[in-house]
Amino acid sequence: MAVPKRRTSRARQGNRRSHHHIRPVQVQYCPQCMQPVLPHRVCSECGYYQGREVVAKEEEEK
């Protein structure tokens, strides 16, 4: 069985794992209500997606 002769350095270990990084969450803002929305999703506040109403919001009765 092959056994490493020397311990793997942190630099080599980091180079091997360089693609394991975490990407930041992309946040966009709805042009209708200016609320933060994830890309390619309907706005949960106003129901708009790409400039048109996709989900009709029900009015709250007080």
Image (cartoon, rainbow, N blue to C red):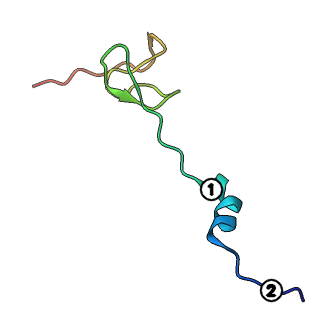
Relative to residue 25, is residue 33 drawn left or right? left
Identified by mark 1, the residue type is His
Q: Provide the residue designation for mark 1.
A: 20
| Residue in the picture at 90% in, 89% down | 1
| Residue in the picture at 66% in, 52% down | 19
Mark 1 vs mark 2, foreground winner is 2
Look at the image and tell me in which quarter the C terminus lies: top left
Q: Earlier in the sequence, mark 1 or mark 2?
A: 2
Residue density around tag 2, few if under 14, some if 14–19, many if 20 or more, within 10 Å: few
Identified by mark 2, the residue type is Lys
Q: Nearer the viewer, residue 57 or 22?
A: 22
Q: Quadrant of residue 32?
A: top left
Relative to residue 26, is residue 36 drawn left or right? left
The spot of residue 36 in percent (x, y) is 35, 29
Q: Nearer the viewer, residue 60 or 15?
A: 15
The residue lying furthest to the right in this view is 1
The residue lying furthest to the left in this view is 62
Q: State how many labels appear.
A: 2
Q: Provide the residue designation for mark 2.
A: 5
Q: Quadrant of residue 35?
A: top left
Q: Nearer the viewer, residue 22 or 39?
A: 22
The spot of residue 54 in percent (x, y) is 45, 17
